[in-house]
Image (spheres, rainbow, N blue to C red):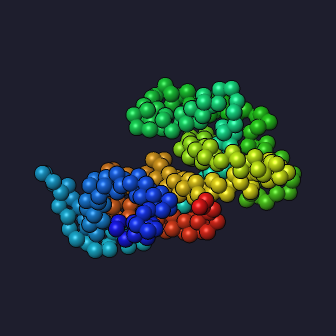
Amino acid sequence: MANILAKYRNKGKLTMSGKRAVAGYLFILPFIIGALLFFLKPLIQSLMFSFSSLDVVPGGYDTTWVGIKNYVSAFTEHRTFFRTLTESFLSMLANSPITLIFSFFAATLLNQKFRGYNMARAVFFLPVILSTGVIAYMESSDLLLNIMRASSQSQEATSSNMFSSANLTELLRQTKLNSAFIGYITGAIDGVYKVISMSGVQILIFLAGLQSVPPSLYEASTIEGATQWENFWKITFPMVSPLILVNLLYTVIDNMTVATNPMMKLVRDTAFTQTMYGYSAAMVWIYFLVIAIILSISLFIVSRYVFYQV
C-alpha cells in the first residue's frame, strides 16, 4: 500500500488520481477482508477435495488422495461433462450480448425524465429481488404457480399471433438473412423473460453511469451543431464504456453461475445425488478455470476500447 501511495504523491501530497485510488482501495477493502476470512479456507479445501476421493463417515469425512484422476475422468470417462460444459459456454456466448444491449437500451430510456420514471426503474429492478433466496424457492415449489405457468405456456404454444417467433422467422427468411442470424434473433425473443430477469443489476449500473455524464458536454456539443445521434456515439457511449466492461464481466459470471445453468445442475447432481464429492469438486475447478479464461480474454479485448476520463 505504501508503494501505491508513493506512486500518486506530488510534493508530499496526494494528487487527485491518488485520492481516487485510495477511495477505490478503501471501497474494495471489506470485500477483500471478507474473502480472506470466509472464502479462502473453503476454497483451499475444495481444491484439496478435487484431488481426493471423499467419503462421508460418522463424525466427519475421510479423504483418499487420487491425484488428477478426477480431472482426467471428467474429460475421458464422464458421458455428459464435456457436452454440458460446451452448452454452458455457448449459452453464455448467446445470452451475454443480448443482456448487455437490452440493459443499455433500457437504461437510456429510463434516464429520460417522464411521469412515473421512478416507478418504471423499480419495475425493471423487481426481477432481481424476485429471483433471490426465499422468493425464488417459493416460486419453484409452488404447485399452483407451476400449473398456471404450464397452462399459460401451452396456450402460448398453440396461439398464432403476429408476434410469435414462428411468424417472425418466416418474415426474416423473406429478407434473405443468414439462417444462423435468424435463429439467434428468434431465440432471443423466445427468451425475453430470461433476458429481462437477468438485466436488473446491469440496468442500474448503466443508469448510474448515464446520470454521471456532465450535462455541460451535451450543451457544448449541441451549440456546435451536433445531433442527438452524434451526442450518443461521441459523448454518451465513450463516457459509459468503463461500465460496459464492468457489466460484461458481471453478465458473464451471472450467466455461467446461475442456478439454472446446466453445468451447475450437473455439479449438484454429482455431489448430492451420486455422493461423489471429490469428483464434483474437480468439475467445479475445471469450470472455474474456464470462467477465469473467458473473463481474462474479455477483459483483454474490451479494455483496449474503454475510455477513462482523466
The answer to which of 7 and 35 lies nearer the viewer is 7
Q: Position of residue 121 (x, y in %)?
A: 60, 34
| Residue at x 74% of width, y 48% of height | 218
Q: How many marks?
A: 0
Visible residue check, residue 103: no
| Residue at x 40% of width, y 37% of height | 133
Instruction: Tell me the quarter of the image containing the N terminus.
Output: bottom left
The answer to which of 157 and 91 lies nearer the viewer is 91
Q: Position of residue 15 (x, y in %)?
A: 48, 62
Residue 190 falls left or right of residue 131? right
| Residue at x 65% of width, y 47% of height | 214
Visible residue check, residue 36: yes
**Could you say which quadrant of the image residue 97 lies in?**
bottom right
Instruction: Tell me the quarter of the image containing the C terminus.
Output: bottom right
Question: Is the residue 299 above or below the residue 159 in the image?
Answer: below
Q: Position of residue 170 (x, y in %)?
A: 81, 47
**Could you say which quadrant of the image residue 203 lies in?**
top right
Q: Which residue in the rendered view is the most extreme toward the left?
A: 59
Residue 70 falls left or right of residue 56? right
| Residue at x 66% of width, y 50% of height | 101
Question: Is the residue 78 above or below the residue 204 in the image?
Answer: below
